Image (spheres, rainbow, N blue to C red):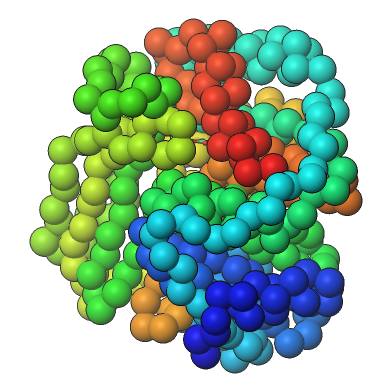
Amino acid sequence: MKKEIAHFFKEIEVLLTSNLPFVVYRKPNEKKVSCLAQKDKTLNILKEFNDSGFVFAPFDDSKNTVIFPFKKCKSFETEISFKSDLETPQNLANVKAKTSLKKAQLEHEKIVQKAINFIISGSSNKIVLSRKEELISSNLDVLVTLKKMLNTYNNAFVYVWFHPQIGLWMGATPERLLSVSKNVFTTMALAGTQSYKNSLRVNWESKERDEQQFVTNYILSSIQKCVDNLSVSNPYTIKAGNLLHLRTDITGKLKETSLLGDIVKSLHPTPAVCGLPKEVAKEFILKNERYDRAYYSGFLGELNLYNSTNLFVNLRCMQIENSVASLYIGGGITAESIPQNEWFETVSKAEIMKKVL
Ligand SMILES: C=C(O[C@H]1C=CC=C(C(=O)O)[C@@H]1O)C(=O)O
């Protein structure tokens, strides 16, 4: 059901106080903002990839994926323009760091160096390492933050997701895990980062080219058996907020015998968020990152909803608990990485969420 913009956000405001599970989201470059609100507080776990609803999956693929089943939800939507004109009153949030950044920098650079040594020893080609940055933010208004994300990040998948047993997550991710519509399959290899300085015409160093090529190769080998008529673009530069990334688009036709669940399982987690070989990198991450990634670098989105599947990788995201906003940020490490540069990359990525707080 389509609603007026003001009416739509009024309903979201009511949902935010209701303690019922819901998600509000807008797909990249679309005007439609959708809401799916579950009618009860059950925590529904995804069992089959032919279910229909909105899924929310953690990084660790041995853990459960949550689904808001379409049948148990009410859904409504609105349309906003591309002119970024949602009114956002001054956000009165008073944001400050909870822990010392200097200490976080030392810790991050230490595990990056450990990963570089591990890679140089021949055990792995690439490992994606991340960290969590906690901010104290009194007076944070989730609705204002959502509107700011919608205004600022047109080409991202923007969302707010809530379940009373899990909490509230929000983000603006530039990375599509996969889309399937009428057997047409689309995915992307996204990696490599540099700051945006008023131009998309930039030079990419071998470190970034290599880390992105690892992702492309991995995706192609994972989907080869399931997809016909594969078409692969050349890597090109895209803008995501204050950052630039390298991206390769991959499309094809799903074979009739291919199962969506098998494809998702073979893709996730891709080397854009985990590394190569996948199991070795995952083990390194779970052992060495000193925190739980939870839903950061998992995936989320529409599963068999309105005749298509649109899943995104949960990046540039944060979790809001009481007055603490936890930002999750990471980057790909290869043999050529320099620990201090990797730290600054996470600092730049953190800006994407800080800008909307
Ligand atoms: C892991 C993240 O970004 C991934 C996506 C794009 C570029 C990346 C990079 O340059 O390392 C990462 O692979 C993150 O934002 O937390």
Residue 113, relative to residue 291: is it above or below? Answer: above
Q: Residue at position x 51%, y 37% from top?
A: 274
Report the quarter where the C terminus lies: top right
Q: Nearer the viewer, residue 214 or 248?
A: 248
The picture places residue 327, in percent across and down from the top left corner, at 69, 38
Residue 299, relative to residue 273: is it above or below? Answer: below
Horizontal arrangement in the rendering, residue 321 relative to residue 244 (left or right): right
The picture places residue 336, in percent across and down from the top left corner, at 40, 10
Residue 211, relative to residue 265: is it above or below? Answer: above
Residue 45, relative to residue 143: is it above or below? Answer: below
- Whether residue 268 appears in this view of the structure is no
The picture places residue 207, in percent across and down from the top left corner, at 34, 17
Q: Residue at position x 47%, y 27% from top?
A: 332
Q: Residue at position x 59%, y 31% from top?
A: 351
The picture places residue 161, in percent across and down from the top left corner, at 66, 63
Horizontal arrangement in the rendering, residue 217 relative to residue 49 (left or right): left
